Image: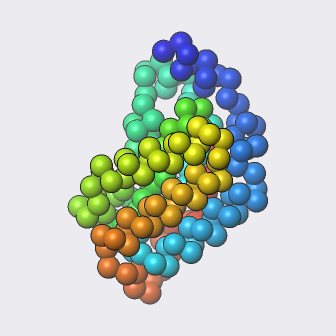
Amino acid sequence: MLRRVLRHLFTPQWVARRHYPPALMEEIQRRIAEVERRHPGELRFVVEHALEPDALLCRLTPRERALEVFGQLRVWDTEHNNGVLVYVLHAEHAVEIVADRGLARQVEQAEWDVLCRQVETHFRAGRFREGALAALDGAARLLEQHLPPRKAGRNELPDQPLLL
């Protein structure tokens, strides 16, 4: 527990910004727009540098925080319940993918979890660009595999990634 707290306390936001510079954030945004044209899912990509001390004291897990962010960003608020959040907790190099109920019936959580663990290996090796793009490409592959191709429609969620 102490080790986790220290890791979060000593991971200031500027560290995450260094690993996710504006050029990478723009590339992530372009990739989201590109892959959303191929499947019916709506992707959001969020990096949080570290948890607040009170969350750490409550032993909030990365999964629990991802669920909170999913709700706060209203990723669930799409016409076909097809929102997907890719959440990265930078201090732990943890990745969680939360799919809305419309997609959860089609893609098992275990498949998302396998993708998360693969992406975490990139982050632990310091390959942040490769990890971010692998997460988006992997999510797109799962959605393309389990769902019919995207019909022309509106983009319901912003493509812009967030750094919290």
Q: Can residue 110 be seen in this view?
A: yes
Q: In this view, does 97 lie above or below 158?
A: above
Q: Can residue 70 be seen in this view?
A: no
x, y (%) of residue 60? 43, 28
x, y (%) of residue 6? 61, 18
Asked if residue 51 lies left or right of residue 114, the reply is right
Q: Which residue lies furthest to the left in this view?
A: 105
Frontmost residue, 93 versus 158: 93
Q: Residue at x 48, y 15 (%)?
A: 1
x, y (%) of residue 100? 34, 58
x, y (%) of residue 2? 53, 12
Name the quadrant containing residue 64. Answer: top left
Query: Which quadrant of the figure contains the C terminus?
Result: top right
Q: Residue furthest top?
A: 2
Q: Which residue is drawn at 40% across and 85% down?
A: 151
Frontmost residue, 119 versus 105: 119
Q: Residue at x 55, y 32 (%)?
A: 92
Q: How many labels does the image show?
A: 0
Q: Residue at x 71, y 57 (%)?
A: 24
Colour treatment of the image: rainbow
Name the quadrant containing residue 48. Answer: top right
Frontmost residue, 45 versus 125: 125
Q: Is residue 9 above or below residue 40?
A: above
